[in-house]
Amino acid sequence: MQGVFKMEKPKIRFINTSYETVFTIEDGEEIEIEAEDKWIRYTCRYIDDFHFSMDGYVFHTYQFAIIREIYGHRYRPVIQEANEEVLYDNA
């Protein structure tokens, strides 16, 4: 009998500008970014421990944190379970 191994998907780590982990998502999961009073969803793809792609752009995790802080964008993972919410607010 052969063993069945479940491969874990790589995780994308979202940090703030102090390098603290805000949340993580698995490769292929979505985040939402608030811009102009609406939330827009983006699928994220793992590249390596410090880079991910989103909407055709490649980001370093720190670069992403700086951009969101400069523009004051709030962002959060899209969570499938009801009643759970994680929100990172740069304010």
Image (cartoon, rainbow, N blue to C red):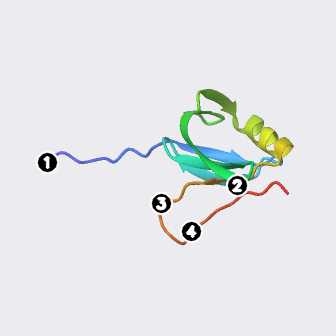
Q: Nearer the viewer, mark 4 or mark 1?
A: 4
Q: Amino acid at mark 2?
A: Val
Question: Dot 1 lies on which element?
Answer: loop
Front-lying residue, 6 or 68:
68
**Residue 39 location, x and y as percent?**
64, 51
Q: Nearer the viewer, mark 4 or mark 2?
A: 4
Q: Amino acid at mark 4?
A: Glu
Judging by the rendered image, the residue that carries numbered circle 3 is 80
Going from N to C along the chain, the mark reached first, 4 or 1, is 1
Q: Is residue 79 above or below residue 44?
A: below
Going from N to C along the chain, the mark reached first, 3 or 1, is 1
**Residue 78 location, x and y as percent?**
55, 55
Judging by the rendered image, the residue that carries numbered circle 4 is 84
CA gap, disc 4 to disc 2? 15 Å
Q: Is residue 35 left or right of residue 76?
A: right
Judging by the rendered image, the residue that carries numbered circle 2 is 22
**Residue 84 location, x and y as percent?**
56, 68
CA gap, disc 4 to disc 1? 40 Å
Q: Residue at x 59, y 27 (%)?
A: 56
Counting the numbered discs, the total is 4
Question: Dot 3 lies on which element?
Answer: loop
CA gap, disc 3 to disc 2? 18 Å
**Tag 3 near tag 2, CB within 8 Å:** no
Judging by the rendered image, the residue that carries numbered circle 1 is 1
CA gap, disc 3 to disc 1? 35 Å
Q: Residue at x 70, y 38 (%)?
A: 61
Going from N to C along the chain, the mark reached first, 4 or 2, is 2
**Residue 20 location, x and y as percent?**
76, 52
